[in-house]
Amino acid sequence: MKHHSASMSLLASMKNDTYLESVISKRIQLFESIRAKQIKERQSIAGDPIKVTLPHESVKKGKKWETTPFDIAKEVSKSLASNALISQVDGVLWDMSRPLERDCRLKIFTFDSDEDRDTFWHSSAHILGHALEITYGCKLVSTMMVSMVTLGLNEQHFDQIVAGAKKEKQPFQRIEASRDEALEMFSDNEFKVEIIQDLPADKTITVYRFGPLVDLCRGPHIPNTSFVKAIACLKLTRGGTKIVKAYKESMGYLILTKNVLRNTFIHIFKKYDHRQLGKKQELFFFHRLSCFFLPHGTLITEKLFTFLKKEYRKRGYSELSCIFFQTKCYIDVVGTPNMYNMQLWETSGHAANYKETMFVFDIDKQEFGFKPMNCPGHCLMFDHRVRSYRELPIRFAEFGVLHRNEASGALTGLTRVRRFQQDDAHIFCRESQIKDEVKGVLEFINYVYDIFGFTFELKLSTRPEKYLRDVETWEKAETALADALNEFGKPWEINKADGAFYGPKIYISVSDAMRRKFQCATLQVNLSYTLRLDFQLPERFWLSPRQTIVCHVSHKTIFNCSLMGS
């Protein structure tokens, strides 16, 4: 502790805040000046149409020097855009925010790819380098090398670094600089000057900025700093209080930390990769064309479905032993078609919002589509005869097959597929019944998750800027959800304005062996759970009685939870 305190004091005494502020200010001014000039130059040549070819040979239209990979990802699907970290243009790794320059072939990667993981770690290193420069006045050599060896970082430092990065969502920005511009920008850092002078005279020099950090870097980088959720302090080395100026002798701490992080996480990813576990345990395997469940894997899924169906039915038939509900009523397990005429999806609104993610085809000159969700079918079942308000709540549960035309770049093992099953229930109830129904669902979740050893987090997403129906109805529903959460007794948070346009949501997330959180996912190894109050469907389907609201509950692919053992 004495050595640690001494080194911290020595570093603090050597830090020159005035020098640091002037250096940072100069770099930012030069960076922004060059960036503004390059933006103006590119605007003068931008706008010509280009064709962007995706891996499955579909072609998207774009504009030269304007359209970015992120723009293309948004066209493909919202989920791909929110999960994409990096892209590849004609075989070259490319920032998601960097404009496309010509007709090209484009690939978009999520974190499950090697390209994304390497980029993620590299960007994380920049965040760490920024913290070192600001905290200790270190002269950065490369992202993971500094001019001082004894840094005295601890877990609290990492928590502060990540908290700031997540909150500010600082974008990574890129410029191309000439040799003279780069030398001027980093003239105060002898290590950077040496690197620049060693580069070939015709070498394009790229510089990146996020927040106040401006640094030499070939890139590419993640879209912004909010993607970095944690920096783990796995191992520290301390060399006493000696300050080593020569960077070649001071690489130990940070280089070691990077390698430990990289090797440790790669090892953990491989250890808990469900694709490898499924193959080793003869549960399922992946062919280049699709995934196939083997006998053992099929047996597990059938057992889990049987368990859930039993629990659904048990919670309707016995008033005395009822865990889910306080009143005697039924949960009916039902079945609906796998495909419908597109008129149904036009009525429900899915055709306008989700058609691009549906499998659509023609039969006898009529358009049909495989169902991506069960909501419209359950509404038809509810409305096939006259209903009395005394029948409410009415609950339908289904274990049907769903199909979604996910982008090929987004498909990953069993965590993102095009065909899957889920126990999907809809509860038709009156506004006055919302709280009790929500509480019953939460108790059901708790019961099932407890059996498998899951813990979970609760978040209430409230009215967004764009929404259906009136504010008063939203406030009643949000109050009912909040009351149910309070009576449920577990901690919960508010996600302000994060609800869907059709109603407020309760997000219930679980974590896998890598401590990654999953919410509302499709078929995957970790359970996720969504509770949704849907104001839109009753009006679209003219459902009666008038006070009916659809309470949508989705157990998302619970049968896969045991495969990871998490």
Image: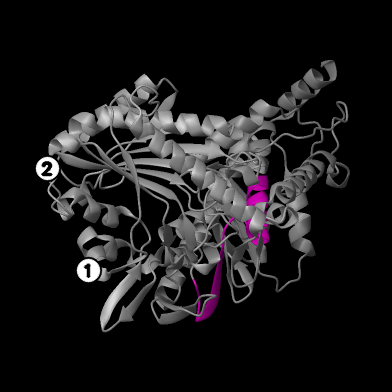
Residue most extreme to the top:
2
Which residue bears the numbered disc 1? 343
153 or 322, which is in the foreground? 322
Q: Is the residue marked by circle 1 packed among few (<14), some (14-19), or many (20+) residues within 10 Å?
A: some
Q: Is residue 63 left or right of residue 476?
A: right
Q: Is residue 209 left or right of residue 504?
A: right
Q: Is the residue marked by circle 2 packed among few (<14), some (14-19), or many (20+) residues within 10 Å?
A: some
Could you tell me which secondary element the residue under label 2 belongs to? loop
Mark identifier at residue 42: none
Region rendered in magenta: 100-126
108 magenta-colored: yes
Which residue bears the numbered disc 2? 545
Q: Position of residue 2 (x, y in %)?
A: 83, 15
What residue appears at the point 26 percent right and 70 percent down from the top-left corner? 342
Q: Position of residue 488 (x, y in %)?
A: 39, 22
Above or below for 326 versus 172: above
Q: Position of residue 526 (x, y in %)?
A: 56, 44
Q: Position of residue 69 (x, y in %)?
A: 49, 66
| Quadrant assignment, res 130 | top right
| Quadrant assignment, res 74 | bottom left
What residue appears at the point 80 percent right and 21 percent down from the top-left corner? 4
Q: Is residue 147 visible?
A: yes
Q: Amino acid at mark 1?
A: Gln
Q: Give the Cα distance between marks 2 and 1.
A: 24 Å
Q: Is residue 464 left or right of residue 247?
A: left
User: Which callout, 2 or 1, points to the residue nearer the camera?
Assistant: 2
Above or below for 11 versus 546: above
Q: Earlier in the sequence, mark 2 or mark 1?
A: 1
Q: Amino acid at mark 2?
A: Pro
276 or 20, which is in the foreground? 276
Residue most extreme to the bottom:
365
| Quadrant assignment, res 158 | top right
